[in-house]
Image (cartoon, rainbow, N blue to C red):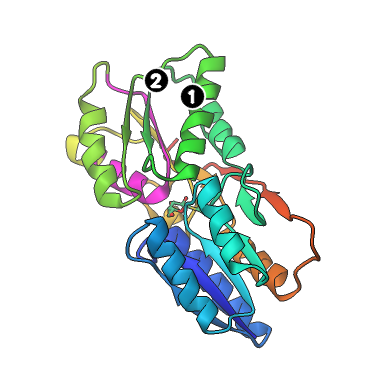
Amino acid sequence: RTLGLLTSDLALHAPSQIASAVKNRAAQAGAGVIIAMPEQATQAACLLALQELLAQRVTGLLINLPLEDDQAEELAALACPTPTLFLDVSPTAQVNSLVFDAAEGARLGAEHVLALGHRVIALLAGPPGSVSARARLAGWLETLENAQVTPAASAHGDWSAASGYEQAQRLLASQPLPEAILVANDQMALGVLRACAEKGFAVPGQIAVIGYDDTADSAWYTPPLTTIRQAFKEAGERSVDWLLQPPTDELSQTLLPVTLVIRSSA
Ligand code: IPT
């Protein structure tokens, strides 16, 4: 048995940690994993990569690419009857999915900074082309709105630490200075922490910073990062178990819980 993994850029921590868990779990079960990583996130590139995996006779497909509903549905139709599971789609897509609860994660993060008493809150979202990035942003906005707080400033990064650093320059130049920054992933939060340190802003004393992911290194940032935990290892393992023993016929859609991990940055 061989599984195919179609993944976002493995230079990013979250997809690489998922891939690692997938590879390990599959190996335990005596199955191999072939990895395809389309260079561009276009639908044409995704379809091509999927066809290449199918040509290698994979017995199951795991798709960890940010996809709009119609894109995912088109890939699922092409893959049929090979069991296929999507990890980065909206729960509204009519495909088999195993996704983390973005609305809940965003709410936990925003409520945490509100509970700390902060009202001047800046947002650093992920790329607008990512469904998960948009869902996290929507969750923040809804939670802030319920508390009658308007975001003091907002920006979009591309998930990388470099983009977090760049966008933080803008957020940190806004007046009044944000008391807290909600960041859509830990790698961008790493860049934000660096920008704060360079400008002499104490975290969390002057600015609270909260990330999202809880990747394996986030406890080792300075200061250790407060973040939303997505249990990537468990998600990778469950995906493999599902693909090796797919339930019959019915659409299988699982929403995975996330948790707030309080460390020292907020
Ligand atoms: C998502 C991560 O939260 C983000 O940090 C980035 O790595 C992104 O993946 C890459 O596509 S997790 C995904 C399963 C929604």
Q: Which residue is mark 1?
A: 141
Residue 151 appears in the picture as rendered: yes
Mark 1 close to ligand 1, CB under 8 Å: no
Verify CB contact (< 8 Å) between mark 1 and mark 2: yes
Name the N-terminal-most of marks 1 and 2.
1
Q: Secondary structure at mark 2?
A: loop
Q: Secondary structure at mark 1?
A: helix
| 184 to 110, vertically: above or below | below
Q: What residue appears at the point 67 percent right and 57 percent down from the top-left corner? A: 96
Quadrant occupied by the C terminus: top left
Side of 229 relative to 247 (left or right) = left
Quadrant occupied by the N terminus: bottom right
Q: From the top left corner, tell me how far across and down residue 45 is, in percent.
A: 38, 64
Side of 75 relative to 37 (left or right) = right
Q: Please identify the quarter of the rendering in which residue 261 is found.
A: top right
Magenta span: 177-196
Residue 50: within the magenta? no
Q: Which residue is mark 2?
A: 151
| Residue reaching furthest to the top | 148
